[in-house]
Image (cartoon, rainbow, N blue to C red):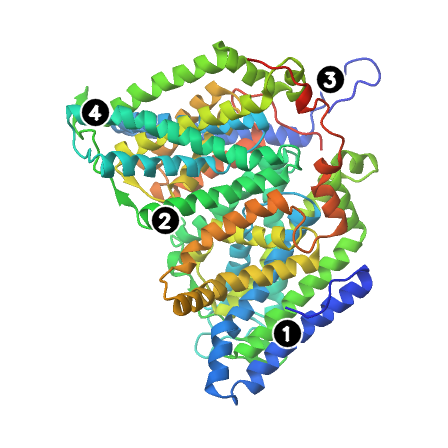
Amino acid sequence: MSNTAPAHTSVSGNRKWAIGFTSAVAFFFILNKFILPEAGSGVQKFFNAWFSLTSMAEIMIWIVMALGLNIIVGYAGLLDLGYVAFWALGGYIAGWLMSPFFSSLQINFFGNPRPGLDFGIHFHVFLVLILGGVFTAIWGVIIGGPTLRLKSDYLALVTLGFGEIIPQFMLNGADIAGHNVTNGAQGIGGLDDVNLFGYVIGTFALPEKFLMVSVLAGAMIFFSIRLRDGRLGRAWLAIREDELAASMMGVPLWRTKFASYAIGAVGGGIGGVGFAILVGGVYADRFNFVISIIILAMVVMGGMGNVWGVVVGAVTLAWINSIGLIQIGELVNNSFGTNINFPSYQFLLFGLLLVLMMLFRREGFIPEARIRMVMNEDKFEDEEVVSDETKIGHH
Amino acid sequence: MTSVASGVARKKKITPSAILMKVSMIFVVGVAVYWLGLNLTSDPMQFAQVTVNGLNNGLLYALIALGYTLVYGIIELINFAHGDLFMLSAVFSFAILTELLGAQSPSGTNYILLLLVLLLTMVFGAVVNTSIERLAYRRLRNAPKLAPLITAVGMSFVLQWIGLKWIGSNPVNVNTVLPSTTFELSGIVINFKSLVIFAITIPLLVVLAFIVNKTRRGRAMRATAQDKDASRLMGIDVNQTITFTFAIAGAAAGAAGIMWAQTTGTVAYNLGFQLGLIAFTAAVLGGVGNLYGAVLGGLIIGLIQSYNDGLAIGPGQRWSQTMVFTILILLMVYRPGGLLGETAQEKV
């Protein structure tokens, strides 16, 4: 994504990566806003096929999601297998608060309703982002609260359960005791256009929308780095590396885990709002377990805990998932005369990726120095107390 | 945790949150009892019918839950791939029995073929499960806990992909060997297929319990589950014991797979994910690591699901999954150790 070399020191490294990220975003914005409309059809075709702006904008949402999950999995070392729930919740907050959906109400708080559709709830986009974050944080607390005291693998299971329940609720939500809460499988469409201080980003203003979600991703990157270096972040890393030692050093385990869970959820909520605005609606059937696993694969592949590693992981996997598999497949099929259905290998790709990464490169491709040591602890430790040679035959 | 620093055992302090937990638990149980009672009094016949159906499904859940509980008991790993192993076994039995051997209708020879393929599917399940253990989990035995867990999730995806490539993305109808005859027992319609499930599952469960509780291997399994280093010192081949456990778990999943394909008449590549989660909930409900707990949990989950889907006054089928996961979450809150297990709380 960027052409800068991996960093050696954290501060200058961050700067290099940040410049790389910003210039990549600026490049795609200027390219699509000013250059491509003037360019020849061949160039247009190439970029639309390999780097379509819709997919690039979605990649930014994936970055937000992956960084949110990174706070839970990468920083605090808790496994969350239902992160898609937060995506769904954030999306529905946008659907509820920025559309004519609740037609019996008529609330307009600095919103930007479409002409003739001024019923429903219309909040300003900033307010919706904040409310989306708060709402998912509350859900993070509800989900994490009872289970964070349990063994870590139980937490994985409960999050998985919520990851199934919440989308199913959205899917069945057209009739909750007679009320239409979520509009069921049809979802909520026709979200308001974003109005930033008088500048309206229209439904089809893709370059501007891309810029908008890129700003979200940038903010998420910034906060992730700042959080990690702060007091709370260092407490998370301490817990991740050794819970017992951390608690002996005075780190309040439960409260710290709780914070990671709530703050990680905020990422999902903000990303969800951003995604809903991007596609102009929120649709329940998109939220399934595969999404949670793809986000997890992004975090694992890039390097758990390392912000820039996760960003690279998110960009790579999101690109492969949305464009790469199809385009590379077409290229291969056309040049070798084969007829392989590449997108059908998605499951194998993500499954094998998770397995192989765990077996051979647990720290990810762009690891953080500390997580490399933690993840390979078993290799550094003394041989097991009783090594295999000394065991007594049992036959 | 109450401290006994003063030397005198102090009475357990009653905190407001503990009272809240108790009260809300009584409330939840009360609502459930009220709901069942309401249905029982309004239509006892249907209630009995739904109960029979529930027990039927419950036995299959129990077979799958056993695999979870055995593996969790011995290496503390939630084997996310287990549900997909069950799916793959169902697909395998379909490919062998229905397609290859062409046993698609009830007849004497086909019953014998069914029994043979049942054994074959169990072997298949055992082989796949032990290979996964050998290739992936064993290398991660001393790694941080996150690593095998993520590996298991990845394995589940790989198995799902195999199923997808094998039978395609749409559910496939299976022409079953078992006849769809029914008979009535004092007003309750009983399916012949459910009798077959009872007749095959219950002996299997008894054999499993015998292996774990009475044989030398079983004793080695229980010892390894308690303390790997100590069992190694006692001369137990820990790796072999773990492989054996995976084999048993895989065989149980295999049996469940073929029973599912033959009784419900459909297989689908994404069957494993849902049923795996239901079965894991069953295992947790009974108390993970406890064999009888898995069976009990499976039966209870089967009943609850059946009541939810089938009773006149109830949420209905579209909330089926939500119901199961809600139970899972409530369990985690109120009784993480399950009905027959010990408490699973960690010091936090």
Circle 4 SS class: helix
| Residue depicted at 39% across the width and 55% down the height | A174
| Amino acid type for the residue under numbered disc 4 | Tyr
Look at discs 1 and 2 and give the one toward the viewer. 2
Q: Is residue A238 above or below residue A331?
A: above
- Which label's residue is closer to the chain start, 3 or 4? 3
Q: Is residue A11 above or below residue B239?
A: below
- Which label's residue is closer to the chain start, 4 or 2? 4
Q: Is residue B279 left or right of residue B138?
A: left
Name the chain letter of the residue that bears numbered label 4: B
Is residue B10 at least partly visible in the picture?
yes
Circle 3 SS class: loop
Tell me the number on the disc at residue B11.
3
On whether disc 4 and disc 1 are found on a single subunit, the reply is no
| Amino acid type for the residue under numbered disc 1 | Val
Q: CA distance from mark 4 to mark 2?
A: 29 Å
Relative to the observer, which residue lies in front, A295 or A110? A295
Is residue B44 at least partly visible in the picture?
no
Q: CA distance from mark 1 to mark 2?
A: 38 Å
Image quarter where the N terminus of chain B lies is: top right
On whether disc 3 and disc 4 are found on a single subunit, the reply is yes
- Which label's residue is closer to the chain start, 3 or 2? 3
Tell me the number on the disc at residue B165.
2
| Amino acid type for the residue under numbered disc 2 | Lys
Q: CA distance from mark 4 to mark 1?
A: 65 Å
| Residue that mark 4 sits on | B111
Circle 2 SS class: helix
| Residue that mark 1 sits on | A25
Q: Callout 3: few (<14), some (14-19), or many (20+) C-alpha neighbours within 10 Å?
A: few
